[in-house]
Image (cartoon, coloured by chain):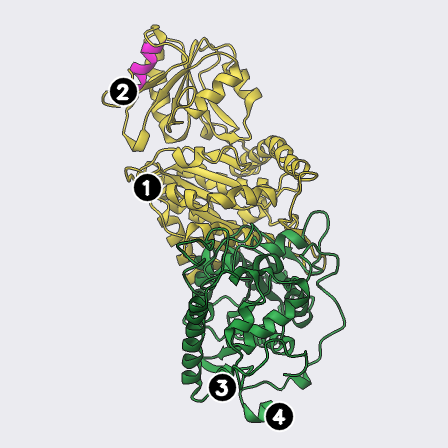
Amino acid sequence: MSAQLIREKEKIIKQKRIALTGNHAVALAVKMARAEVIAAYPITPQTPVVEKLAEYVNNGELDAEYIPVEAEHSAMSAVIGASAMGARTFTETSSQGLGHMYENLPIAVGMRLPIIMGMAVRTYSAPINVWGDYSDVMSMRELGWIIYITQNAQEAFDTIIQAYRVAEDSRVHLPAVVAYDGFWTSHVLQPLDVPEDEEEVIRFAPITRSWVKLDLDNPAQLGAVGTPEWYWEIRWQAVEALRGSTKVIEEVDNEFGRRFGRRYGLVSPYMLDDAEIAIVTYGSVYGLVKKAVNKLRSEGVRAGALRLRVIRPWPGDLIAKYLGNVDKIMVIDRTINHGGPLYGPMATEIATTVQRPVYNVLATIGMRAIDSDMIYEAAMKVYRGLWAPGVPYTVGLRGGYE
Amino acid sequence: MKVAEEYPGLYEYANFELPQEELFLPGHGLCASCTIGVIARHMLKVLGPDTIVVNPTGCAEVSTVVYPRTNWAVPWIHVAFGNGGSVASGIEAAIKVLKRRGVIDPNRKINIVVFAGDGGTADIGFQALSGMLERGHKVIYVMYDNEGYMNTGIQRSGTTPFGASTTTAPAGKKVPGNVTHKKPMVAIAAAHGIPYAATANPAYVHDMVYKFKKAAEADGPAFLHILQSCTPGWRFEPKYAIRVLELATETGYWVNYEIDHGEFRVTVPVPKRKPVKCFLQLQGRFRHLKPEEIDTIQALIDKDVAEINRIVGREVIGPVDPGLECLTPRGAR
């Protein structure tokens, strides 16, 4: 079932259909969520987001402070400062930009600041490659951020709004990143349903200001020295908050569905009920995967698919539930964990979750295009036992492991 | 004040009264006689309780805010080492928008101060500082300069003076310690076109507090470069913490001046200078220097002093008088 099919009749707010690129959809969501401080530095492919936000601010459409910082390290620093002051904040980055802001990412978590960051994903240098793969966002997995990976412009728009509500929930107070494919989503014009009354967004995700702030009337010290006697306990609270955020993410997604008519879940399953082979992936490639599944089904192979939407917190129970009875699990990873056990980070995590080897396929690295036939062929190799579980394979790589 | 008549650039300190209230609280873990406490305490006396302190990595941070205790009776934030300027930029922007949206009383005057060491300012934090100054955020940036990475154990920084022995620029057989001289941070800050930039010295506390006041009243970013004596890093006896700072000014090694809307003023004139040797010989970090290396430092100071006198247009820092005693009794100057 695709997310758009789950439509509830009650209380769905009026919406209009427009067309926007993924980047501009994100900017629009940030505007409707009335972000108060935006700090950003341009980097391909996210640049149109921050350009559009600058336009909104300068046109008077969004009452926010826009800080055109001198680097991403400062972009993250500025939104940390602004969030610590109690403002709703936004920044966006990709690739090297994320690398440049990296040291501040765990700090936003430790201070429990509900910063929302967009990410039009892009691979890391070298060689220089401005195109989309998931190297950047996957390198954030261990830091404590909530990580959403969305499939298209509509979902990116919706998820930004959901993320504000989740991050600012007093049970959570964690930063969240909303990732989507560089170019394949960020730059492609797509249909988008947006509320006719923009206020609906702020009604759904009001600014709570419930987190610990730099309050002049109740001075707090943010980022104090945590000696070995204290650090672990304090960090563990962030660990537990991330674990507990699963419930909040689901709640918020459900309520978003009731109000806006779209919900996505932590994962999106497709034809998994009786599947003997499942293709697991994330991002925009899921559309091709579903097409490949349809072709496999038409040939009598009981195939299914699973899209990972929230990878932090890791929805392990749900993944185990959907994949537990599937014979062969093929994970298409869109980034390389150099020298890692399977080379694919999600394959490794899925294997741990289902507690058996999975078939790991690397594809779309550096935005190398693939099509549904290539996915179909890879799945067929897995299905026929030509490929072994627990070792990495590649799709679309000259001289790769196939 | 007689000096004020002689030197019209000097402030009238007498009208300035500090509040009794302490906002930098006692019980910190700073080294014996560390002058960071002197700077922080007077800074908050001037800036008052409606002040937010941004404290990048450094001595001040590790010794004053060890959870669950704090020495700051005002909101305080530490993010990382190199981002004091950008964290403060975000705070300032947030206050602006929160005032517009009615979350914070629009009439409340809130000071934002970055309290950073020389490493966090002149080196790793240089870019964030420059960005903040360039964008014109109304933030007071205070750089306490102990002339090295004293928090991590006396490594050289961009403001370590020529000849100082540090652990990463040790005095050896081939090289006499640090081979570069102090990065001119006030000149660099002022070159951004900010309304107020100044140097200060805790040994001249009236001058220093007046500059905090001027910085708070500035209609844009303000930058203060404050010399701070460091017992373990400079290697002097703790009782000399203020005396060594006095000697810095008395020798012309350190000149207290300000650049107020482009107007340059020396705020502590020195009619006759002591030789820089007086400043150096009190400190272990210069102990290895040969006479010719001390001459090199004296020449560096003479050149800086000549430049300052040229800018002012008269001899506001006087010539070296070898007849002056290095350690004159306090109050005799």
Give the labeled residue for mark 1: A189
Residue A222 can be seen in this image: yes
Q: Earlier in the sequence, mark 1 or mark 2?
A: 1
Amino acid type for the residue under numbered disc 2 = Gly
Q: Is residue A363 magenta?
A: no
Quadrant of the rendered structure where residue A175 is? top right
Element marked by disc 4: helix
What's the distance in space between the residues labelled 2 and 4, CA to CA? 85 Å
x, y percent for residue A343:
39, 23
Question: Which residues fall within the magenta stretch?
Answer: A373-382
Q: Mark 1 lies on which chain?
A: A
Element marked by disc 3: loop
Give the labeled residue for mark 2: A400
Q: How crowded is mark 2: few (under 14 residues within 10 Å), some or many (20 or more)?
A: few
Amino acid type for the residue under numbered disc 1 = Leu
Seen in the picture, residue B156 relative to B109 is either above or below; the reply is: above
Give the labeled residue for mark 4: B2
x, y percent for residue B280:
53, 68
For the residues tagged 2 and 4, is the chain the same? Answer: no
Q: Residues within 10 Å of mark 4 (few under 14, many from 20)?
A: few
Amino acid type for the residue under numbered disc 4 = Lys
